Amino acid sequence: MKDRGYYGPFGGAFLPEILVATFDELDARFREIKNDPEFWRSYVSLMSSYSCRPTPLTFAENLTRYFGGAKIYIKREDLNHTGAHKANNVMGQGLLVRKMGKKRVIAETGAGQHGVATATMAAKFGFDCTIYMGEVDVIRQRPNVFWMEQLGATVVPVTDGTRILKDAINEAFRDWVTNMDSTHYVLGTACGPHPFPEMVSYFQSVIGKEARKQIMDIEGRLPDKVFACVGGGSNAMGLFSGFSDDPVELVGVEAGGKGVDSGFHASRLCSDDASPGIAQGYKTYFLQDDDGQMKETHSISAGLDYVGVSPILAQMHDQGKARFEYATDDEVVAALKLTMQKEGIIPALESAHAFARAFKEAPAMSKDEIIIINQSGRGDKDIFTVADAFNDPKWKDFIVSKAGEYQND
């Protein structure tokens, strides 16, 4: 079943007829590269010279001492080129696009990190690039929009629906249907129609491969738990893949927003608001009502503000192969602040969900136990949201001052 893009009852490729041939070609080309050891070597070589692979595994000595429990290690995907794990996927897909001979790439983005990574890849390989981004996310992630445009990409604000990630994905698919002969859709997470969940997980597996080797080299044994935030699921799949055959507890952390009982969250696997359904070309758990209409989502982090979840993670949830929890906005902000002040490390708001849950569990663990937190991205992109959450008066004065300068111009 897995070879057909199914993971238990989840996954598949529910496509309009016009896209079937395009997906068949993509699947065939992906099979070719996946079975070619030379391709993986070329991919690793590219990431080691162009990005920052292997990314470090950092011992969080101060946080470990502060909580007094398990040893805390941080997998530093924030040190990847463009500041997140997203580069792993887009550079792999870029190599694939070059093999397919296509000249244009499109992508969706929520937090903007996937958009920046795709625009970067397009600049390096010489592709035309269009990025679709919900209008709400354009506003709250303006620094990333600026960099995408400076890298040469066209950023299209999506004004349909709730104007966030779900709607950006819909708009990207509309573009692809019209331009499939010349264009490849660089889907950013382990969702969507087959082969995207498998393909994105394949490129992100470099995270888990490295983390497993690094912890064995440092500690001489496996960790007891690993933590990753879960939006669509690409960074979680990347970390989990390195330990899926080991006696290691895999913990995914969703966006609890204002609380899973509030109606303002993006938790698919930890709430009663989600159920299996089919949308955007695949089957998984979606936040939907009894009529199959998608509900609005909320998260302080734009990258976790998504209505569905990877079909691979959906199966892992149902089979008990991974445990899923959630962190609220308030818990995320507190975890971000503590990590900054104790370690001098600034996680993205998405990553801070994993930190928040790990901080809850670490104190009750013994000092001989080990956890790894995947820091999927860095937090500088979140400066507007974080400064607002911190209620920083100097930042507010700065914004007012800059606004006055622009008005005077």
Image (cartoon, grey):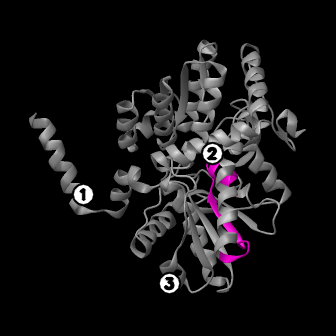
- Residue that sits furthest to the right in the current view: 1
Residue under label 3, please give it: 66
Q: What stretch of residues is rendered in magenta? A: 219-239
Q: Which residue is identified by label 1?
A: 395
81 part of magenta stretch = no
The amino acid marked with disc number 2 is Val
The quarter of the image holding the N terminus is top right
- Give the residue displayed 86% in from the left and 33% down from the top: 4
In the drawing, what numbered circle is on residue 240? none
Q: Disc 1 versus disc 2: distance between alpha carbons?
A: 41 Å
Q: Is residue 57 left or right of residue 344?
A: right
- In percent of width and height, residue 408 lies at 9, 36
- In the rendered structure, which disc, 3 or 1, sits on the residue that comes first in sequence? 3
| 24 versus 351 height, above or below | above
Element under label 2? helix
Marks 1 and 2: CB-CB under 8 Å? no
Q: Does residue 305 appear anywhere in the picture?
A: no
Sequence-earlier tag: 3 or 2: 2
331 or 265, which lies in front?
A: 331
**Relative image position of residue 155 (x, y in whole percent):** 42, 28
Query: Residue 89, position in %: x, y?
Result: 61, 41
Work out how far the residue at label 3 is from the one at label 2, CA to CA, in angstroms: 36 Å
Q: Pointer 2: what residue?
A: 44
